[in-house]
Amino acid sequence: MKVLKFGGTSLGNEASIRQAKDIIFKNDSILVVVVSAVGKTTDDLNEAANFAKMGDSKYIDTFNQIHDLHVLLSERLCGKVLPELEEVFEKLLRVLEGVFLLKELTNRSLDFILGSGELLSSLIISNFLLAEGLSAKWFDSRKIILTDDQFGSANVHSFETDSNIKKAKHDFEVINVFAGFIAGTESHEITTLGRGGSDYTASLLAASLNAEIVEIWTDVNGIMTADPSKVKRSHTLDKVSYEEALELSHFGAKVIYAQSIAPVFKAGISVVVKNTFEPDMTGTFITSDENNNGSLIKGISSIDEVSVMSVSGNAALNKIDFFPRLFKVLADNQVEIIFMTHSNAEYTVTLGFKASEAKKALSFLKKEFRNKDESQVIHSEVLEEDYSLLALIGSKMKDQVGVSGKMFNVLGKNGISIKAISQGSSERNISAIIPKADLSKALNVLHESFFLSEMRRLNLFIIGAGNVGKAFLDQITGQFLFLKKHHHLNVKVIGVANSRKMAFQKDGIPLSKWQKYLDEGEVFSKEVFVETMNDVNFRNSIFIDITASEDISELYASILSQSISVVTPNKIAATRSFENYLELKAASRRYGSQFLIETNVCAGLPILSTLNDLIRSGDQVNKLEAVLSGTLNFLFNEYNGTISFADVIKKAKELGYSEPDPRLDISGEDVMRKLLILIRESTYEMEMDEIEITSFLPKSCTDSVDLDDFYHKIEQEEPYFKAIFEKAKAGNSRLKLVASFQNGKGRVALEEIPETHPFYQLEGKDNVVLFYTTRYAEQPLVIKGAGAGAEVTASGIFADVLRIAQSNN
């Protein structure tokens, strides 16, 4: 014998009821069929009741809609209007009229009204099955499921109900239809079984009949790893244990309810949750076997609206009955506690309630301790709103170390603060109270970490779509499939901007069309860009600044504080005051974000990452020498006195080696910033104005008004540039702008480099850094390579992005 329960969504219209009939027809055993109300009938009945209570005649319109729907279904499915339906509607209308006249809606009246939905559906479906030639019979649940008179959520009289079910079995046909949700008292008044009542009816019947299985037919393929409306990549679980199902139910899973499966849990009967509209799908089996598969975590559940109440007892008064009385008053008033943790040392308990229950709980608590002598027992009570509860569920967590550590580490890295934590005594759940605004982000990042660890998603927000920005986006586009296949990394560009426009797409801007989206975007505003980035609140977010803007660099601190990592070749932020530099570093540590500036020095060369590895391993930089400008190295390598120095500068700009305004490179300021960053990353304190710089430019060139004036003055000073070149050549040396640090002093100057020096052979736009450290005292650690160009810089940015992806794994 099987028990099949069909939910309201499985009976929403004629087509879905016929689909349910096909499912019933395919079974070859004796069936008990439990049905919910059709579609949204229960909601409509509740609406009619509330209209009547308010004295609003709209209840008649709602009643007529319900009536017409069921009459139409009866005509279509049964070939006639069933007289039993009209009898139900006649009584229902009288009760609604009474509520309307008295403007009073009691729980007893509401049970009668709401229970009518299941009566109507069960009568239609049993007669429909008969009309289809099936051997079917209708049973009146009101006379079989007996309860007390706790209207609204009645308590079942187990012994009498079990006896009635066993008696009813003697009259069974092949298919036996019961109305779910409704029951009756010994005085024949209608009661309801509360939330999940139809499942509870099915479970009671299955337990008494010793059924082989209970099939719950709904509109989803089973129990999901997470709420699919919040986590798009959630998937169906093949099997869960009773205990896991109960935990999932308690923490918000809407497919099943804890009370509903309690009778089959006790009887050891398996339950399967299946989709009426995809009946061939396996569904989820709920069994007594806790070792039903090797999965450590079975699901992530949540309760969206939670209020948190922290109550502190006055330890000085040593009231030993404080906690017992606290919990008793809540229990006596049927206030459900969904979360609890307490501190004995501070005599404090933190309780979580569904938002609708919290103020009621606080009121009962204050009333309990209202007497003057007892008012001092409570030291303080604080009620906080706008929180959510999330929980990891799984039987095998009790056998595994590190689960909670991983959970909280993942949340921390994504900037999700935790108000309170608790692990159930069953060790099948780890729950946390978090800000409601972070719930979707938390669910997704935990789901990705525990269920989809092989595929990680990065969400990029990019400001700067010039040469380097375009090269970076081209590199992402070119590597997208490779990263997905070989590194299980899904890179999404959520926002992109330049100085004029910005565009956003929550599901990711198509990489092949990013320019089109940008061109058609809204007017750029740095404040709106950051606000939008914060509002979408995506996990694993990275802000990428590919500009030289001081205004954009001022945003880093606030972005890092949102646990969003920053990657940038923009050197301004790291070269402001040393205090500001330390603040950015501290913000990244405090909020679990990263501030990666590899491309601040030598574009894509691994200078800073190598330096950081040295420092972390205990080494110390004692001296460094470097050629840090690819542009200047190119200029002095290209210039040979046969073409003007001004033409060489123009060539460097055309090739993309220099800034749009080459004066930024030639002034030496850019080299100073790079040197300052190297010194600071070597753990030394230094400010920009402490670095000594000797300009190689004649004074006339440093006073240029605009770029054209600059080129003109460089042309005029050509004899000067030719003279310094010839002097170096005569000494068999080459000109290099060298940055150095030793004995606490930084210096930038043009030097004649002899052929015995490592810098002599530096070609093209290459850069080089020599680190003299405690470990590399005599022979320096040398890092050398291309230090300029859009492609090289873009590859350095890409490398920083991948470092963040690896660290978040």
Image (spheres, helix red, strand yellow):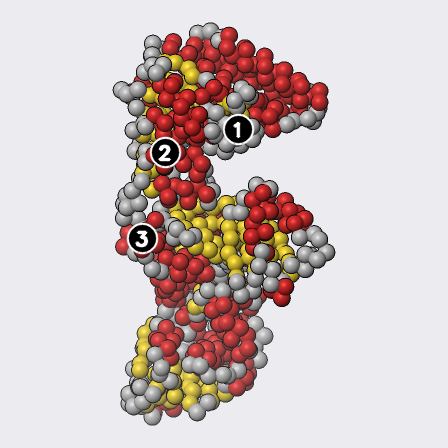
The front one of 424 and 570 is 424
Q: Amino acid at mark 3?
A: Glu
Which corner quadrant of the image does residue 58 belong to? top right
- Label 2's element? helix
Q: Amino acid at mark 1?
A: Asp
- Label 1's element? loop
Residue bearing the label numbered 3? 454
Tell me, for residue 674, which label it has, or none. none
Instruction: Name the residue: 34% across, 25% down.
Output: 209
- Label 3's element? loop
Instruction: Name the residue: 40% across, 58% down.
Output: 404
Q: Reading the chain from its start, which is encountered first: label 1 or label 2?
A: 1
Which corner quadrant of the image does residue 189 belong to? top right
Residues at badges 1 and 2 in contact (C-beta under 8 Å)?
A: no
Residues at badges 3 and 1 in contact (C-beta under 8 Å)?
A: no
Residue bearing the label numbered 2? 264
User: Where 373 sits versus 729, above or below?
Assistant: above
In the rendering, at what x and y percent does residue 457 appear?
39, 53
Residue bearing the label numbered 1? 148
Circle 3 packing at 10 Å, graded few (<14), some (14-19), many (20+), is few
Q: Amino acid at mark 2?
A: Val
Q: Is residue 452 visible?
A: no
The front one of 734 and 513 is 513
- Please give left or right for residue 98 compared with residue 263 in the image: right
Label 3 and label 1: CA atoms lie apart by 53 Å
